[in-house]
Image: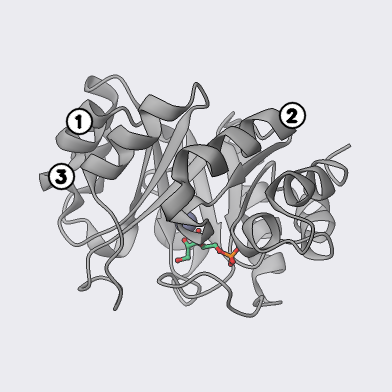
Amino acid sequence: MNPCMLAPSIIASDMGRLAEEIAMCEAAGAHWLHVDVMDGHFVPTISVGPLFVEACKRSTRLPLDVHLMLEHPQDHIESFARAGANNLTIHIEACENPLRTIERIHSLGCTAGITLKPATPAASLEPVLPLVDLVLVMSVEPGYSGQKFMEGMIGKVREMRGRLDSLGSRAHLEVDGSINVETLPRMKEAGANIFVAGSAVFKHKEGTEAGVKSLLAQLD
Ligand code: DX5
Ligand code: ZN
């Protein structure tokens, strides 16, 4: 079983104080940093690009987990890899040739993740599961931080856990979307081991460090 890890989603931070926010995550014991890239097409919103990943890289030693909510991700993976991404996760719905894109991510020296929108069935990942290092189950519609948790995604995590186990896969099973002190233990019980959290970290009423620590306390 992979270790349980916390990946704060930096899109929910106070970006005017980016380096400070990242330093607080690191000091409080976060394991990875999650960066949400949104293109205004695959999802309605626009967020950040490779320059932002590069800025994060300069501020931290934490691995950068880059979630590409982009059409044609194959056209952009090289610039994100060069910017310092450690893991690149692509959406199955957005990718014309997922197998080739995953190979390309590996050839650039990154680990490769695959993800799917809440309405996309777990079975759609079957052809790529043997190749990936990470599977991300979204528990909100991709595009925004601060949405309501989709209860139905607990069953999808359980199903994905079963599929990975039956393949003998060592891939991480990550969850993203409204992960907080209440939903994290339920996703963990269902078989997830990496927990992405935006609001529960950066909008915590006692600050970012307290947000990280409150979630880390749920990982044991
Ligand atoms: C949603 C993003 C998430 C989001 C998480 O499109 O992929 O990473 O920032 O934020 P919360 O934890 O607030 O749902
Ligand atoms: Zn994300």
Say which amino acid is labelled 3: His
Mark 3 or mark 1, which is nearer the start of the sequence? 3
**In the image, residue 35 above or below residue 200:** above
Let me know if residue 86 appears in the view: no
> For the residue carrying disc 2, how many other residues have a C-alpha within 10 Å: few (<14), some (14-19), or many (20+)?
few
- Which residue is painted at 34% across and 32% down in the image? 85
- Quote the CA–CA distance across marks 1 and 2: 27 Å
- Which residue is painted at 66% across and 64% down in the image? 203
Per the image, label 1 sits on a secondary structure element best described as helix
Mark 3 or mark 2, which is nearer the start of the sequence? 2
- Measured as percent of width and height from the top left, residue 25 is found at 63, 38
The residue carrying mark 3 is: 76
Q: Nearer the viewer, mark 2 or mark 3?
A: 3
Residue 104 circle label: 1
Q: Nearer the viewer, mark 1 or mark 3?
A: 3
> For the residue carrying disc 3, how many other residues have a C-alpha within 10 Å: few (<14), some (14-19), or many (20+)?
some
Per the image, label 2 sits on a secondary structure element best described as loop
Between 14 and 30, the one lying in front of the other is 14
Screen quadrant of the C terminus: top right
- Quote the CA–CA distance across marks 1 and 3: 11 Å
Say which amino acid is labelled 2: Met
Its colouring scheme is one colour
- Quote the CA–CA distance across marks 2 and 3: 32 Å
Between 213 and 156, the one lying in front of the other is 213
Q: Which image quadrant is residue 65 in?
A: top left
The residue carrying mark 2 is: 1
Q: Are marks 1 and 3 in contact (CB under 8 Å)?
A: no
Q: Which image quadrant is residue 4 in?
A: top right
Q: Are marks 2 and 3 in contact (CB under 8 Å)?
A: no
